[in-house]
Image (cartoon, coloured by chain):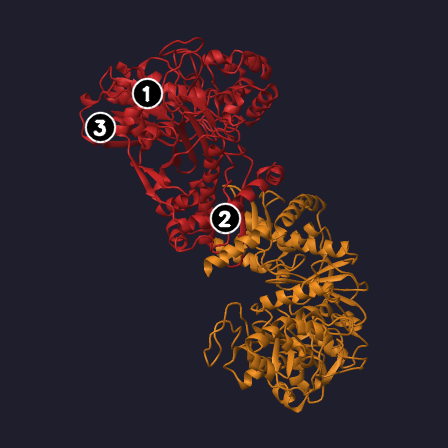
Chain colours: A orange, B red
Amino acid sequence: MVGVDFGTLSGRAVVVRVSDGAELGSAVHEYAHRVIEHELPGSGVRLGPDWALQSPQDWLEVLKRAVPAALAAAGVPAEQVVGIGTDFTACTVMPTTADGTPLSDETPELPHAWPKLWKHHAAQPHADRINELAARRGESWLPRYGGKISSEWEFAKALQVLEEAPDVYARAERWIEAADWIIWRLTGVESRNICTVGYKGVFQDGSYPSKEFLAELNPGFADFVDKLATGRVGDDTGGVTLAPLGGLAGRLSAEAAKWTGLPEGIAVAVGNVDAHVTAAAADAVRPGQMVAIMGTSTCHIMPSDRLAEVPGMCGVVRDGIVPGLWGYEAGQSAVGDIFAWYVESCGRGHEELTALAEKQAVGQHGLVALDWFGGNRSVLVDHNLSGVIVGQTLATRPEDVYRALIESTAYGARMIVETFEQAGVPVEEFIVAGGLLKNPFLMQIYADVLRRPLSVIGSDQGPALGSAIHAAVAAGAYDGIEQAAAAMGKRTEAAYTPDPERADAYDRLYAEYRRLHDFFGDGRMLHTLRAIRNEAHA
Amino acid sequence: MVGVDFGTLSGRAVVVRVSDGAELGSAVHEYAHRVIEHELPGSGVRLGPDWALQSPQDWLEVLKRAVPAALAAAGVPAEQVVGIGTDFTACTVMPTTADGTPLSDETPELPHAWPKLWKHHAAQPHADRINELAARRGESWLPRYGGKISSEWEFAKALQVLEEAPDVYARAERWIEAADWIIWRLTGVESRNICTVGYKGVFQDGSYPSKEFLAELNPGFADFVDKLATGRVGDDTGGVTLAPLGGLAGRLSAEAAKWTGLPEGIAVAVGNVDAHVTAAAADAVRPGQMVAIMGTSTCHIMPSDRLAEVPGMCGVVRDGIVPGLWGYEAGQSAVGDIFAWYVESCGRGHEELTALAEKQAVGQHGLVALDWFGGNRSVLVDHNLSGVIVGQTLATRPEDVYRALIESTAYGARMIVETFEQAGVPVEEFIVAGGLLKNPFLMQIYADVLRRPLSVIGSDQGPALGSAIHAAVAAGAYDGIEQAAAAMGKRTEAAYTPDPERADAYDRLYAEYRRLHDFFGDGRMLHTLRAIRNEAHA
């Protein structure tokens, strides 16, 4: 099997053995244009603040370069590969023609013709209007997203295109996630995967937001859903049919076979999202298994057999992680990013700070911090919050602040876990994936703060491995994702266990974190500071 | 005139012209033992945490070295000097025999025999008991100190000696401020100046705390006042007679003339405190002239014709700055210390940070901080508070934090000024002295935050100049401190004026500072963090 993970800065291909998930070889291709934030390639047209675009050509290069390179690295003949699966960042979304041609190929000088990367945040005013109207109308889908949808998602970004570039909007016969567009390129068949449709496309209980709702936002937006609800795969049950995760999206086309060096006609799995597909790689697709993908930010993914309205979650989607279960997502906007910020601020290295910080007893630094340096995704869903550090004295050293910042992100994780449980959705196991896994000091703090054992994924290329697992299901090697994950996924249970004494000490500090959470969480002060800041910059 | 300023690490002598205050020459002698914090000189006996002692011999060396050196630097023949004045840190206090011999000369191996420097903080439990009992008994002097006396002051330090070294306490025939001890050395005559007696000796309305009060603290403490109330100078009006500021303490003794090279028999002014004597140097001894001596910490000194109970002030003392007026004192525990702490934390220099920070518009950094890194002296009188920084994002740069910390100390100063005015004590003029005066960026921030012009002192050795002014009065060259200060003191009015637009912007940020002040000022969270810290260290 081949799994391909399309990330923010690069794409990674990995060759995986179907029987046991052994990773035989991998290769990474860095996107030539990385993230397009300031000006358009070629034309040099300037972009506004908070814009973030990508180039579809960069993604195709991953197929052409990383896939053959991974095969070569694995020493596996292409003929032995029986399927390919992919995952993508999301919501990364783009306008195309009816045959899937990106509008940025036709009019590269128009900013809105390009794919908008997940972290394009210039549609915040549009998201605000969507949320306001949905709350006023009492739209039934709103609670499924913790009460607020994100500016990163499909509807907000599309509304921005309509209102700022009506011409581009009119020419866009499709508005499609990159996760699905790449499948279209691989198979020649258009499909829409349930995961992005649910989490990013606001599709709930069999339908998108209503035409009346969309028309009230903007009369020109009334028929927007027509740009989404095409390319059907699987059973048609009424209005819209979507492609189930682990399903067969199609067969590898002759053209794509030429790009990748893989055999024409092999199975291509339905598209998926990097975080969600990691659950399979960690063999964590059963109810109550929460996978935290911890890197620059953290994404929490958990299947459950119960539907509940968890305050501040990013979303709950039926079949959104594995078919047959509700899939929950929550997140922390900045985690590793905070530590990197502090390292840059204080001019000392991670290793030096860790060596000093790990000698400390819990609470010895006298500090508690709020981990909102990138806003708060869960459970407050407020990107305009900011960080707070409390308790400094003239004796406070950089390693004290560094440790307090790590702890603050652990408190943030505990807040999410507790919010799920209080909403009636049990968290049975906490599994860590992602880059921060490599920091045992941080891992032990999380175990102590969460007061629970931490399991860890057994791969450092979780998304690509997860995509290969999905490909194995699509190719028919396993009956379903759960079986494939059990055979091919990798998880070490209770790799870190809490120390009761340290956990008790953290309980006291966490109580103070909660007091800060309550005081600053209403945004009264932090929004004022941000407003003053923005006016001063203007 | 010669003025001598005894500081924390060194003593400075300055030669000043009587007619106009011109500073003709100066010299500094660093104390050989500086601050004794860890072990006693000679015996190597270990000291406990929060101890801070000094050596009387170091002070005498200042007379022997710095005074002749200053004369030499000035090129002034010793015969032309007609008086000498001194000022000291306070409360720096010591046990002596009846003839003024320091007990540390006799038993240098006993820690409690040594002078306790102002920043000896090991008597906090004793101060706590004094405050508790005084509050319970409703002692009338307590409100004169903002409701709490400090562990730094005479009674707390003496009670510690009594209870930890009763033998030393019994041998101490005198318990005397270094400010008065040095005068005793210079003149051979014991005196007690009104300033330290009032601010540090809890002397109000003609008397010390009652025998009953002291006995209730500890029966052995009942007659403590006998160790204080001797060495009378001036009119005897009832119980205790004290030496007025600007008064003549005595004449230079033959021995002291030999030490200093000055003529025997010249006028020696009554002892004084470094901060309080600076008011004369700034020609700011009239009602409503608040002098802020801004350095590592800030001390606020202001004469007034009104008596009021200002919440959280350090003290109000009749005749405590100049005869005939009430003298108010308030303070900020850490100011320059905070900036030095941050420079050390972030590894960047003051100049680099200032160059970047001064380009910013007000509020552009999005931050507000609480300046409690060394606790809060005024208006909360709580050394167990600590600092808070609010509003950081991943885009926050070190110069942003640096600027926010400077601003936080300006907000702290505004809080003090407003508290005085709300208590009915008008602040007519704000005059800055001390090392931070040299930072025009900081000065402009203070002017903008305070919304008032800042006057500045015209000397960078304010205390020594002030002492020389007091000496001129003692020698009869002027009728009083006000006249001498007018002739010899140096002040530039409105050296910095507020910009209305920046001041408006700061009003909004100050409102947030006050919200933080209210939330964290009760100490609930910050005391908890400190308690957890102290337990973790134990």
Task: Answer with mark 3 or mark 1, whichever residue precedes in sequence.
Answer: 3
Q: Which residue is mark 2?
A: B509
Label 3–label 2 contact, CB within 8 A: no
Name the front one of labels 3 and 2: 2
Measure how far apart labels 3 and 1 are at the Cα level: 17 Å
Q: Given the image, on which type of amino acid does mark 3 rest?
A: Arg
Say whether mark 1 and mark 3 are on the same chain.
yes
Q: Given the image, on which type of amino acid does mark 2 rest?
A: Leu
Tell me if mark 2 has few (under 14), some (14-19) or many (20+) residues whose alpha carbon lies within 10 angstroms of its own.
Answer: many
Q: Position of residue A118 (x, y in %)?
A: 60, 70
Name the front one of labels 1 and 2: 2
Chain letter for mark 2, please: B
Camera sees residue A273? no
Q: Which mark is residue B246?
A: 1
Q: Which residue is mark 3?
A: B17
Q: Given the image, on which type of amino acid does mark 1 rest?
A: Gly
Q: Position of residue A153 (x, y in %)?
A: 64, 70
